[in-house]
Image: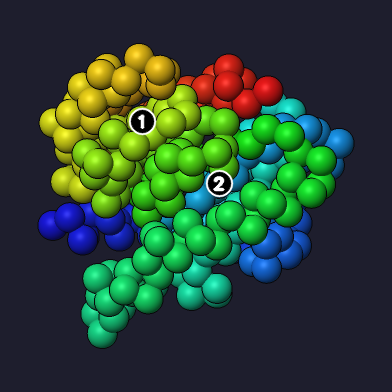
Amino acid sequence: MAGRQCCANPPNLNPSSGAGHVEKLGGLSTYVTGSTHSKLGVLLVSDVYGYEAPNLRKLADKIAAAGFYVAAPDFFYGDPYVVNPERPIQAWIKDHGADKGFDDAKPVIQDLKSKGISAIGAVGFCWGAKVVVQLAKGEFIKAAVLCHPSFVTHDDIKAVKVPIAILGAEIDQLSPPALVKEFEEILTTKPEVDAFVKIFPKVSHGWTVRYNTEDPDAVKCADEAHQNTLEWFAKYVK
């Protein structure tokens, strides 16, 4: 069930979607958008479907419009997950572990800093949330947002050192509300780390980037999560 939910509602990937363009950052093909004069950056770490998902790029553009320079790298080297009975999600994840994503994110961040960006936040979706929580344990980023996280553990949350927002779904086998509440309880024991935890009612895992653009209710819920993400970065990435 969890595997199916992780892969539900696959997007129609479009390499030409978005208002930005693709360039190399940290050795990875990366969708970038926003003013190159901005000193504030945001790193988007996608779910298993990768950086060519139109809703992901639309969100990148929305964050860029708020004044950030935004980068969404291709952490999968041209091999995003494709629903295929002969290569189940578990096999794909073996080839694309979050530890590798974490290692790959570091040179991307270095390249962003070399462009003059002095403060960076990161938001991760599903698979990407595990990468972002790893970044949040060190000095790599100023703030983190986890959207419907996958594979994130209690120990990960205990090690977080930067302000963190966790946006969970009511209908989610990968990070059910009970687990998200446990994350919140851990964070309340860490007064040095500001935290914001919210569970969105009536939505499923993946709702922030794999929503149906023709469904007004789905768009409204995604927009609310996007606004929470923007507010978090406006507060801490400066």
Q: Residue 58: tell me if it is visible.
A: no
* Residue 120 % position (x, y): 63, 36
Residue that numbered label 1 is attached to: 166
Residue at 35% from the left image edge and 30% from the top image edge: 167
Residue 52, quarter of the rendered image: bottom right
144 relative to 230, above or below: below
Q: Which mark is residue 44?
A: 2
Lateral position of residue 57 relative to residue 189, left or right: right
Q: For this view, does 67 lie left or right of residue 236?
A: right
Spot occupied by residue 229 in the image (x, y as percentages of width and height): 50, 28
Residue 40: in sight, yes or no?
yes
Is disc 2 placed on a helix, strand or loop? strand
Where is the C terminus found, in terms of image quarters? top right
Precedes in sequence: disc 1 or disc 2: 2
Q: Residue at x 36, y 30 (%)?
A: 166
Classed neighbour count for the residue bearing mark 1: other residues with Cα under 10 Å, few (<14), some (14–19), many (≥20): many
The type of colouring in the image is: rainbow
**Residue positioned most to the right:** 37
Residue 9, placed above or below residue 202: below
**Which residue lies at the image location 31% right of the left edge and 73% below the top edge?**
94
**How far apart are the alpha carbons under marks 1 and 2?**
15 Å
